[in-house]
Image: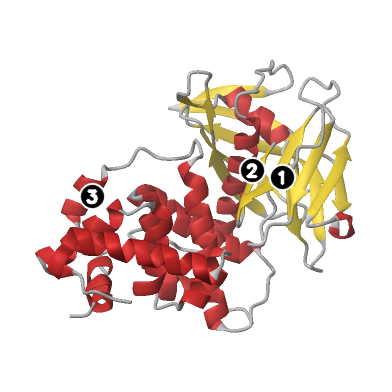
Amino acid sequence: MSNREQYKKAFSVLQASGDFTLGDEKMAVLKKKAMLRTFAAAACACLVIVGSSRIAYAANVGGIQRTIQLWMYGDQTDVTIDFDGSGNYSMEYTDADGNTRELGGGGFDVDADGTKRALTEDELIWLLFEEVDVSYNDDGRIMLYFQGQVADITDKFENDICYIFLNGTDLNGTDASLYVTVLKAEDGGFPIDSSPDRYLQYKETEPGIYTVY
Amino acid sequence: MRLPVQDLMNMYKNNVYAVAFSICKNASDAEDVVQDTFLQYYMTHKHFDNEQHIRAWLLRVAINKAKNIQFSFWHRNGMPLDDYIETLSFETPETKELFEEVMKLPEKYRVAVHLFYYEDYSIKEIAKILRTTESNIKVRLSRGRAKLKDALKEGWEDEQ
């Protein structure tokens, strides 16, 4: 048996076990998760827990349910969010066309000693409230969504990087403007990093791998 | 051209999983990479020349995501590699030993070896996928083969 034949036999035992059903609804959930994951990664170690005076909430069985107004792709809407207490959430809202949408996600923070901990409800809401979304619209334009703002940033990329300053507020209504850096990645995605102080920079440390500094 | 993502999953999910596993050495992380890779395809508006172009793109995205996940806080504490290997159904003890030895290779050799022997890519194609030079890939393959020969003795044929 040749090396190649033997190698193929050895590695053919690896079979993906996941049940990957990829309908549009499922993809929308996964997309939201992926974006929150990116945002949570950028925000880890510098999270600030804020009060939730503007959030109505009620305890439910096995977790916490809250109703909050969030900007969803440029539309402000009431969203009911269920938290499982382990850093995960699921939410339901009605989009601009009147369709009921379900999304979900979760996140972890890394404490100073390197241990992981699930984000609290307040931290997740904080992230969702300040989340920046970038995606293609139906016309193939690259659109940025942040709170009530929608911007066409298609022509703002230089060397595949777009810098944009966004005026915004936090949950307390105080200024929370962001310096946002959007990378047009070769794999088609849009990694986003932001800071209240300066534009973060991307450096390609090895082919296809970018480090933020 | 574009192909339906579900069709691509049926065709390539095991290939994506295998290359991701060869980097992560962790089934849970490799499963995440599979999902994220096809999600990336779903989200991108990129157009491809042909099916082979899509396949190479999927593998490159999977490799990058697998490398990233190792350094992220999303890295899962999955089953130890040795325990996971015991759950796999190898045809012969020799193929199991080969699998174990490949997993011991340094990552950059392991990925090149995998793309060459499992995905049947040429040195030129591997260089393109990994965004490096052909001479670099030749070195990685040569060193990877030498380590496998050293470990497996008669279980691995000499090659140029």
Horizontal and vertical percent for residue A98? 73, 54
Indicate the quadrant where residue A78 lies.
top right
* Residue visible at 77% across and 52% down in the picture: A96
Q: For the residue marked with disc 1, what is the amino acid?
A: Tyr
Horizontal and vertical percent for residue A47? 64, 23
Element marked by disc 1 = strand
Marks 1 and 2 sit apart, C-alpha to C-alpha, by 6 Å
Q: Examine the rendered structure and indicate whether residue A34 appears above or below residue A115.
A: below
Q: Chain of mark 3?
A: B
Marks 2 and 3 sit apart, C-alpha to C-alpha, by 31 Å
Indicate the quadrant where residue A93 lies.
top right
The answer to whether marks 1 and 3 mark residues whose Cβ atoms lie closer than 8 Å is: no
Outermost residue, left direction?
B93
Identify residue for label 3: B84
Identify residue for label 2: A211
Horizontal and vertical percent for residue A167? 88, 34
Colour convention: secondary structure
Q: Is A14 left, or right, of A169 in this rendering?
A: left
Q: Chain of mark 2?
A: A
Nearer to us of marks 2 and 3 is 2
Can residue B133 be seen here? yes
Q: Is A19 left, or right, of A163 in this rendering?
A: left
* Residue visible at 24% across and 60% down in the picture: B99
Nearer to us of marks 1 and 3 is 1
Can residue B5 be seen here? no
Work out whether residue B131 or residue B159 is closer to the camera in this orientation and state it.
Answer: B159
Horizontal and vertical percent for residue A19? 38, 60
Q: Is A208 left, or right, of A2 in this rendering?
A: right
Q: Examine the rendered structure and indicate whether residue A44 appears above or below residue A11.
A: above
- Which class describes the residues within 10 Å of circle 2: few (<14), some (14-19), or many (20+)? few
